[in-house]
Image (tube, helix red, strand yellow):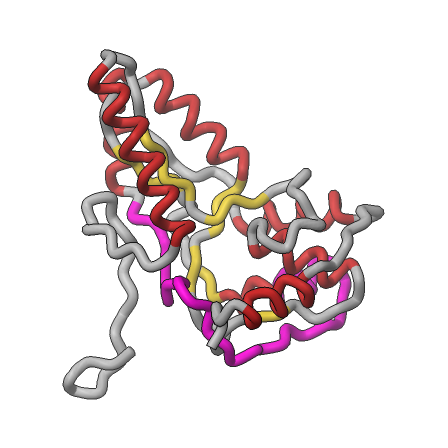
Amino acid sequence: MYDEDNSAYTPLPTPEYKKPNLSSVYALSKYDQERLCLITGKAYNIPTTALRFFNVYGTRQALSNPYTGVLAIFASRLLNDNAPLVFEDGMQKRDFVHVTDVARACRLALETPEADGEVINVGSGNQYTIVEIAQELAKVMGKDISAQLTAKYRVGDIRHCFADLTKAKALLGYEPQVRFEDGLSELAEWLEGQIAVDSVNKATEELASRGLTV
């Protein structure tokens, strides 16, 4: 996207206080669950914290579910020697956080009384383009397969999404510890010998049939 001077906008980390601009049923359901938990906690004096996980990855993810995390979906494609399908131009940015960092954040929230009633981002503090992710995963899996850009937009998707961790660090003392390179190597090692049913083409056809890709 460009501003009035035809200069490219610089994407910024998403803070917890950003006003929701929900554009899909999926996003709405997540926000509704968050609000329901916080309101219930306050009404019944139950300590409650809402953690907003960004793109969680790690071993033992469901590889045959075409609606799970993007790394698992790409892994499923590559295990079957198929090219990862990437929407838009592949330059959209996301935040990938390792599951052990997510578990650490959950523990910190449980142990921090000041977290009661708060909404807190849990991410890696880094940003990667989706096409970068596809390339790096193929590399660590030993697959000489390039991503396929569909040039299609999936209705409801946002262009960039990565976490502002200012609040998590200040309130919980949360610091991501797993480097993406290390987490990806661990994932690749686990993927060896795994079997995945590649249902991505079927899922893509379903999205198109419902008018959810343009």
Is 146 left or right of 37, judged from the image as shown?
Answer: right
Residue at image location 23% in from the left, 26% down from the top: 39
Q: Is residue 169 visible?
A: no
Compared with 168, 123 (above or below) is below
Is 47 left or right of 132, judged from the image as shown?
Answer: left
Task: State the image quarter where residue 167 is shown.
Answer: top left
Q: Is residue 90 visible?
A: yes
| Residue 193 placement (x, y as % from top left) | 84, 47
| Residue 62 placement (x, y as % from top left) | 67, 43
Residue range (magenta):
135-164
Task: State the image quarter where residue 134 is shown.
Answer: bottom right
Is 2 left or right of 80, judged from the image as shown?
Answer: left
Looking at the magenta stretch, what is its main secondary structure?
loop
Residue lying furthest front in this view?
A: 210
Magenta stretch: includes residue 140: yes
Magenta stretch: includes residue 148: yes
Foreground of the two, 167 or 176: 167
Residue lying furthest left in this view?
A: 4
Compared with 69, 121 (above or below) is above
Residue at image location 54% in from the left, 50% down from the top: 180
Q: Quadrant of the N terminus?
A: bottom left
| Residue 155 placement (x, y as % from top left) | 42, 67
| Residue 19 placement (x, y as % from top left) | 19, 51
